[in-house]
Image (tube, grey):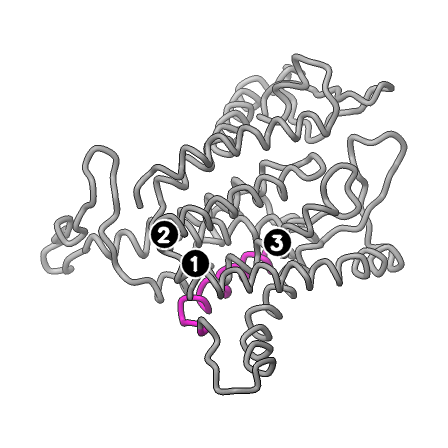
């Protein structure tokens, strides 16, 4: 029955997104709420902040779908799945990250603030989580109570506390920021997110562990439609509200499904991208006068439509730096890399 509710959530949110997204694009254009689409000739402007619509669709799906199901049959037929406290906690965490994305879009909160402040956003989920025996490479499943640390008069720091109050908030914060950083091309963030979320649903189904994926399923349906309008050439982009919300959704799903190490594998391209950028920042601090290490956010487009990138210090720029590639080709290369690591992640225990 869980698979039925998951499929219903995917298709309902997909249909609602397909119906509302063209209207949303027209409205945003009519209000002048547009931003520049880089890597295009001229000064092309497209609507932004589609993450607002994604959140609205997810909320509508999880609230309306059970009611529609009951009204349609007109009998005392229970919806295959009721909304749970854990679903509420996942949604609250995503919502907090989304609101922070709105703030970042308007005032640019800075990278340091994106690390510290979002640690608080996962606590609704931390409170709702039940304990588990996490799997560690080479060690198998570990009983957290075996890792209690006594501090004498100050009490005991249990393994469960370490996991719930330290590792989980940091994990979700890191995933959200990794997703927010690995963007810049049409469809790059949305396509990679859709691949990861889809593989998470697949892995959960393979493990017969779909019970906590209702909210994630609603996001997958809405994200699939958004990707169609965000892929090259994009008609709309997500904004920080969208990238942080979807990133936190991925992090939350990995946590509640106990896929911490599988998530590391699935997100390996994003991790590599971060490490490359981190190295770039270090070298810029050490050699501030060297133009080779100057921090540049965007590249350019040549007359033949291929990308001219300033360096090879972020993952999406590596191939265009060495080969003449279009934005679309470079983005598809990132999809292929993400898919390969997601396939590996299917076989990592949870």
Q: Is residue 310 above or below residue 24?
A: above
Give the number of the disc on residue 168: 2
The image quarter containing residue 54 is: bottom right
Of the residues under marks 1 and 3, which one precedes in the sequence?
A: 3
Residue named by callout 1: 122
Mark 1, secondary structure of its residue: helix
Give the number of the disc on residue 8: none
Mark 2, secondary structure of its residue: helix
Q: Are marks 1 and 2 in contact (CB under 8 Å)?
A: yes
Q: Which residues are magenta?
A: 82-101
Of the residues under marks 1 and 2, which one precedes in the sequence?
A: 1
Looking at the picture, tell me which residue is in the foreground, 275 or 344. 344
Looking at the picture, tell me which residue is in the foreground, 252 or 332. 332
> Which of the image's four quarters has the N terminus?
bottom left
Residue drawn at x 82%, y 23% as measured from the top left? 305
Magenta stretch encompasses residue 95: yes
**Image x and y of residue 156, in percent:** 15, 57
Q: Are marks 2 and 3 in contact (CB under 8 Å)?
A: no
Q: Is residue 14 above or below residue 238?
A: below
Q: CA distance from mark 1 to mark 2?
A: 7 Å
Residue drawn at x 19%, y 51% as measured from the top left? 144
**Image x and y of residue 49, in percent:** 71, 54
Q: Is residue 227 left or right of residue 276?
A: right
Residue furthest to the left in view is 152
Looking at the picture, tell me which residue is in the foreground, 248 or 259. 259
Of the residues under marks 2 and 3, which one precedes in the sequence?
A: 3
Residue furthest to the bottom in view is 75
Residue named by callout 3: 101
Residue drawn at x 62%, y 70% as measured from the top left? 60
Secondary structure character of the magenta stretch overall: helix
């Amino acid at each position: 029955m869980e698979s039925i509710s998951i499929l219903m959530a995917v298709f309902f949110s997909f249909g609602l997104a397909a119906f509302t997204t063209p209207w949303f694009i027209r409205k945003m254009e009519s209000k002048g709420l547009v931003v520049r689409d880089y890597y295009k000739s001229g000064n092309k402007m497209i609507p932004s902040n589609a993450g607002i619509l994604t959140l609205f669709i997810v909320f509508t799906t999880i609230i309306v779908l059970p009611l529609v199901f009951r009204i349609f049959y007109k009998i005392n037929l229970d919806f295959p799945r009721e909304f749970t406290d854990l679903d509420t906690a996942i949604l609250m965490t995503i919502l907090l990250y989304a609101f922070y994305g709105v703030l970042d879009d308007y005032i640019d909160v800075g990278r340091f603030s994106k690390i510290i402040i979002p640690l608080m956003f996962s606590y609704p989920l931390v409170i709702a989580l039940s304990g588990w025996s996490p799997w560690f490479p080479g060690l198998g499943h570990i009983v957290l109570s075996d890792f209690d640390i006594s501090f004498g008069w100050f009490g005991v720091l249990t393994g469960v506390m370490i996991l719930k109050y330290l590792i989980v908030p940091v994990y979700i914060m890191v995933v959200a920021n990794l997703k927010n950083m690995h963007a810049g091309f049409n469809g790059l963030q949305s396509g990679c997110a859709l691949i990861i979320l889809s593989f998470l649903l697949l892995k959960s189904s393979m493990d017969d562990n779909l019970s906590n994926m209702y909210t994630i399923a609603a996001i997958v349906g809405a994200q699939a439609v958004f990707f169609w309008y965000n892929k090259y050439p994009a008609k709309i982009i997500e904004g920080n509200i969208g990238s942080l919300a979807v990133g936190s959704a991925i992090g939350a799903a990995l946590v509640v499904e106990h896929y911490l190490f599988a998530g590391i594998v699935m997100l390996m391209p994003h991790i590599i991208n971060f490490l490359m950028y981190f190295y770039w920042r270090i070298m810029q601090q050490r050699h501030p006068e060297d133009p080779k290490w100057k921090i540049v956010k965007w590249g350019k487009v040549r007359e033949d439509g291929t990308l001219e990138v300033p360096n090879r210090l972020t993952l999406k720029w590596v191939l265009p730096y060495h080969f003449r590639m279009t934005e679309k080709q470079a983005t598809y290369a990132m999809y292929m890399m993400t898919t390969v690591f997601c396939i590996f992640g299917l076989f990592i225990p949870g």
